[in-house]
Image: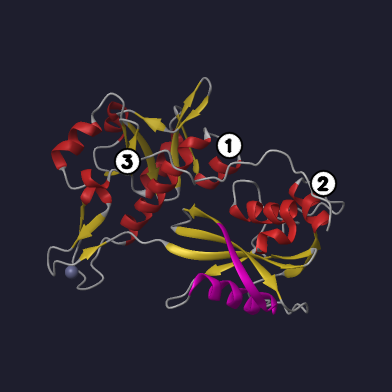
């Protein structure tokens, strides 16, 4: 039994653990929404496509705007009801991507992408779930202006949670795409890979979209076999993470490797190999002798690798 490895305090998983009550029963109540929107305690998150608009303050950046601030910003935007934080309403304020980008020219704003905000800790972590919710919803509206059934122009309804087709009466709902992300384990070694898109020296868990008619466990085994030629047996769920790039749900798992010989799918991966627990610990702590690293703590891959480094084979129990 290898000695336990202590990596220090557990980091926060970005975008997860939202403090909001989604209060879905209010979505169809236009008069209640109108007064919630203008409440003193109401805050709005401003997003356009991949761009998030932050206010510059003397203490850094603030992602939350008042009703008067967003009203001054634009009079044509999607108003998306995100939920209640205690009694305080939270809305997404959805802009066209180009308009949000044009706000870069204004001194009072800092316009950047959500991934940078999370990785660099530009705003307090409690805002990240609402920003993720806003970004995924807005992306869906930008890409679903027309009915998939008859092609007519659809209209926003239910405070941003549905689009209705006036012609064929179809109702369309925002989608979430499940992705299996997994760490295959063979005793005291784990399988990590890197794609050409990764930053230099970074290795991570393998991952792939769960396909129609497929269970999470089946997707874990299929993706690991396709990408690295490794067969897996037991699969154990660890945690999930909303991943608003644009609208995935990352479903984090550990899997028991039952073969050892790696065959890399070069269309998906640049490299894949086995790493020992000590090596993985050094990568998490940014102390690997060759400078190899894992994804940052904002990503679920970091947490999946960390859970195995700390708990070993017990993650498969
Ligand atoms: Zn239609």
Quadrant containing ligand 1 reads: bottom left
Q: Is 221 in the magenta?
A: yes
Q: Nearer the viewer, residue 288 or 103?
A: 288
Q: Position of residue 24 (x, y in %)?
A: 26, 47
Q: Is residue 208 left or right of residue 129?
A: right
Quarter-of-image position of residue 130: top left
What residue lies at 18% left-to-right and 67% top-to-bottom?
Answer: 170
Disc 2: which residue = 287
- Across the whole image, how many numbered discs are drawn on residues? 3
Gap in Å between the C-alphas at discs 3 and 2?
41 Å
Gap in Å between the C-alphas at discs 1 and 2?
22 Å
Residue 2 drawn above or below residue 52: below
**Does the Cβ of the disc 1 residue fall within 8 Å of ligand 1?**
no
Q: Position of residue 226 (x, y in %)?
A: 63, 79
Q: Position of residue 214 (x, y in %)?
A: 47, 76
Tag nearer the camera, 1 or 3: 3
Q: Is residue 91 visible?
A: no
Toward the top, the furthest residue is 58
Could you tell me which secondary element the residue under label 2 belongs to? loop
Disc 1: which residue = 121
What range of the chain is rendered magenta?
A: 215-238
Q: Nearer the viewer, residue 165 or 259?
A: 259
Q: Is residue 177 left or right of residue 203?
A: left
| First of labels 1, 3 by sequence position | 3
Number of residues whose C-alpha sits closer than 10 Å to that of mark 3, classed few (under 14), some (14–19) or many (20 or more)? many
Disc 3: which residue = 83
Residue 53 drawn above or below residue 177: above
């Amino acid at each position: 039994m290898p000695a336990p490895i202590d990596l220090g305090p557990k980091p926060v998983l970005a975008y997860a653990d939202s403090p909001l009550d989604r209060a879905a029963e209010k979505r169809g109540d236009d008069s209640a929404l109108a007064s919630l929107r203008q409440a003193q305690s109401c805050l709005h998150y401003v997003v356009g496509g991949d761009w998030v608009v932050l206010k510059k303050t003397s203490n850094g950046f603030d992602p939350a705007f008042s009703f008067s601030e967003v009203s001054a910003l634009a009079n044509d935007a999607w108003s998306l009801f995100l939920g209640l934080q205690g009694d305080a309403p939270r809305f997404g304020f959805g802009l066209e991507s180009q308009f949000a980008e044009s706000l870069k020219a204004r001194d009072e704003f800092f316009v950047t992408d959500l991934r940078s905000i999370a990785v660099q800790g530009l705003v307090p972590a409690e805002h990240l779930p609402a920003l993720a919710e806003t970004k995924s919803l807005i992306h869906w509206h930008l890409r679903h202006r027309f009915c998939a059934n008859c092609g007519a122009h659809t209209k926003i309804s239910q405070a941003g949670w549905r689009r209705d087709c006036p012609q064929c009466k179809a109702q369309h709902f925002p989608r979430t795409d499940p992705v299996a992300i997994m760490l295959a384990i063979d005793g005291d070694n784990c399988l990590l890979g890197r794609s050409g898109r990764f930053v230099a020296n970074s290795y991570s868990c393998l991952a792939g979209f769960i396909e129609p008619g497929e269970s999470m466990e089946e997707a874990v085994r299929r993706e690991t076999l396709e990408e690295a030629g490794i067969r897996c047996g037991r699969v154990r769920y660890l945690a999930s993470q909303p991943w608003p790039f644009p609208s995935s749900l990352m479903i984090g798992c550990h899997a028991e490797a039952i073969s050892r010989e790696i065959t890399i799918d070069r269309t998906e991966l640049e490299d894949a190999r086995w790493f020992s627990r000590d090596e993985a610990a050094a990568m998490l702590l940014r102390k690997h002798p060759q400078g190899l690293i894992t994804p940052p703590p904002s990503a679920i891959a970091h947490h999946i690798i960390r859970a195995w480094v700390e708990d070993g084979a017990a993650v498969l129990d």
